[in-house]
Image (cartoon, rainbow, N blue to C red):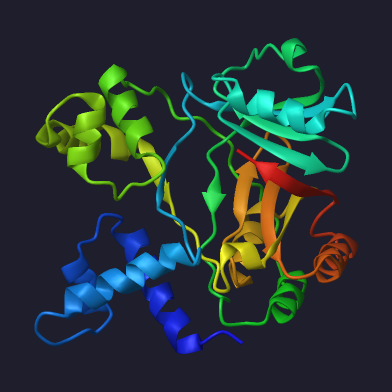
Amino acid sequence: MMNVKIIDTYYLIYRAIIEKPRIKLKELAKILGLTGRGRTITTAFKYLHRLYEYKISFNPNLILRAYENSYHTAYFLKAQSRDSLSVTFQTLAKDPKISRVMFLSGMYDFFVTSRHSDLNLKKHDVSLCKKTCMYTPQFTVPHGWKNPMRDALISLSSSLLEKGKLEREREDFLPWDDIHWDIFYSMKDNVRIEFTKVAQEVDVTSDTVKKYFYQAVLPYCDISHYFFPKGYDYYDKSFIITHSNYEKDLINSLKKLPCTTYVYPLEEELALILFHEGINDLMRAFQKMEEAGVIEKYLLLVPLAQW
């Protein structure tokens, strides 16, 4: 059984970083109600360190929104040979034109995203099953982190939703030069990295990094942060592709779950990475939503590895 009081402290840190990703330890200590001379910052640092050490969260990431001149394409792939799936996964992961690859069990073998809409897939010995534009992803803030997973899934499946599709649009133009891309790639996996480290990587001064980050990089990005009250490795993961006319409310209702849900809007459907504690409870919840007409259909796959 998790210690609710301690997890509540981690949740406060998680929410504080959502509001202010580069929040200082002194400010964090104040939010946590830490008092006393000398030890407040040290205690705040320990909590922050353990938040990530225990994989209750991960470093906040920069998520570049979708633009007319810069967006991701999603590919659903099937391996030509069943004998070398792991090798194919590794070769896909090494392709510099591929941003992300997920090794799946189910109808598809791989889910790949790329900023290139014309990937050469023949060299990877895979067949293309489906190709679709991907719009700006969303990462839910879990309000139900104190609730048992089964209860949360029951609450999700019983939600009264209104019809409404998610708007799918790309913003006009991304006006970045090489220096902006360099700063983005240096900071995308950890928005809290010191500007001095970024400066060393991109070969400019830390003041220049700070200026470009706040004035030219951050305004074109969203920031994702994650929360898993029992730790990321504790949960099972499912990759779900669903069609629904209730997309907006469905995404909002995913906040009832204890963990962050990853939402990837595709052209005609939503792809979800959903964290749970038992496939039967998850299937029961989605079957109930399908019977209620909230979702038209869904496909469930199991992520085996990702890069």
Q: Is residue 208 left or right of residue 167?
A: left
Instruction: Say if 3 sits above or below 245 in the image.
Output: below
**Number of disc labels:** 0
Q: Tell me what residue is drawn at x 41 percent, y 74 percent.
A: 10
- Asked if 23 appears above or below 142 in the picture, the reply is above
Judging depth in this view, the residue of 240 and 270 nearest the camera is 240
On-image quarter of the C terminus: top right
Q: Is residue 282 above or below residue 305?
A: below
Q: Position of residue 280 (x, y in %)?
A: 86, 69
Q: Can the viewer see residue 241 in this picture?
A: no
Spot occupied by residue 237 in the image (x, y as percentages of width and height): 71, 57
Residue displayed at 55% across by 29% down:
99
The residue closer to the viewer here, 192 or 274, is 192
Q: Quadrant of residue 182?
A: top left
Residue 77's spot in the image, x, y percent? 79, 27
Q: Residue at x 13, y 87 (%)?
A: 36
Q: Residue at x 42, y 24 (%)?
A: 172
In this rendering, position of residue 141 left or right of residue 295: left
Q: Quadrant of residue 232?
A: bottom right
284 is higher (above) or lower (below) than 201: below
